[in-house]
Amino acid sequence: MNTTVRETAGALGVVGDFASLLKLRIASFIGLAAFVGGLLAAGPEVPLAHIAEAAVWVALAAGAASVFNQVLERDSDRLMERTRDRPLPAGRISLRDAVLFGTAIGVTSVAALGWRFNVLAAALTLATMFAYVAVYTPLKRVSTLNTIIGALPGAAPPLLGYAALAGDVRGWAWALFAILFVWQFPHFMAIAWLYRHDYARAGLRMLPAEIGGERIAGKTAFWYGLVLLPVSQIPAVWGDAGVVFCAGSMLLGLVYCAAALRFALKQDRAGARMLLFVSLAYLPLVLLLVVLDPVTGVAAAHISR
């Protein structure tokens, strides 16, 4: 019995390690954003299950990119306290198995998007994976500009979901891309400040880890928070959103700005953690506003089916 228990625990541990490579928490956010993008593109006659399928493939593609990110950064991960226990630096998964796993997930997700949806969605997803793995990841050792480059694939999920269901990208797809692009900067400034010593130890060029960069991380977060306010109103300006999204996103943006201002005025762990928490709440709430806004008609269309 004890042997069986140990074998079961060992098997679950292996499964957990492979799941860890996919960064499932981040993948779930990505899947949610892709799902909302798909909702905006699809008509009420399209089953929710079909939209959810596209979101799952996009999330899995992001998971594959995370696997290869960890493959490339396994040495630097060993040097950072928050990442040294990841499966690759800890030696619980071999490099070969991680590469095979990431390749299988990546190829399957891109192929499924091309087969079940359209070539544009597959091509954009592949380009997003390439930008994250082959451009952003190595650039982290070269320049602090990596944050800007990394924000491009980071903003892509709603656009990918939209492309999968519509076969093109327009309107809301670009608006959500812009909102997510700007949203990432205060979010990442909080993370990079909290782990600035880890990043410096590993030789990763993050602004708060640079000489003098630690002092301006809060100001950078605040300025991007201010930029997010008008950017979040783009759908209303285009006539794609109404008062629910317009007022709600402005209120959320002001709360985000307030958290960023608190961090800018006093850069400490409490301020950084508060900003991080607010950033994590902002994204799903903004996406919820998209769904609930009467002008988009998303919620009403699918409830009435």
Image (cartoon, grey):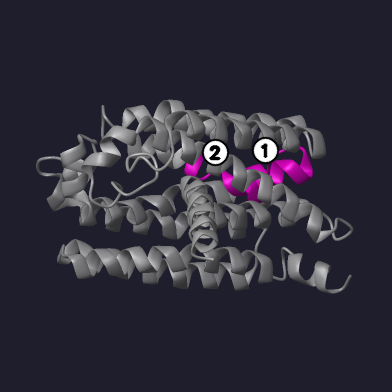
In the rendering, which numbered label is found on residue 109?
A: 1
Instruction: Give above or below for 13 relative to 277.
Output: above
92 vs 297, nearest the viewer: 92
Residue 173 point in image, percent of width and height:
64, 47
Callouts 1 and 2 close, C-beta under 8 Å: yes
Q: What residue type is labelled 1?
A: Ser
Q: Compare residues 181 and 7 and report the one nearer the observer.
A: 7
Q: Which one is earlier in the sequence, the residue at label 1 or at label 2?
A: 2
Q: With respect to residue 244, does 165 lie above or below?
A: above
Image coordinates of residue 115 in percent, x first then y, are 80, 34
Vertical arrangement, residue 119 with respect to residue 14, above or below = above
SS type, badge 1: helix
Q: In the image, is residue 177 above or below residue 269?
A: above
Query: Is 170 contained in the magenta span?
Result: yes
Residue 20, given in percent of the width and then of the height, sits at 47, 50
Identify residue type, mark 2.
Ala
Query: Is residue 63 in view from this perspective?
Result: yes
Magenta stretch: dominant secondary structure: helix
Q: How crowded is mark 1: few (under 14 residues within 10 Å), some or many (20 or more)?
A: many
Residue 58: % across, % down: 63, 44
Residue that appears at 74% across and 37% down: 112
Q: Quadrant of the N terminus?
A: bottom right
| Left or right, residue 68 beside residue 205 | right
Q: Does the magenta stretch include residue 269?
A: no
Q: Classify mark 2: helix, strand or loop.
A: helix
The residue under the point 82% across, 73% down is 303
Please give the range of residues in magenta. Answer: 153-174
Mark 2 lies on residue:
64
Quadrant of the snapshot with the C terminus: bottom right
Quarter of the figure with residue 245: bottom right
Structural distance between the alpha carbons of marks 1 and 2? 9 Å
Q: How crowded is mark 2: few (under 14 residues within 10 Å), some or many (20 or more)?
A: many
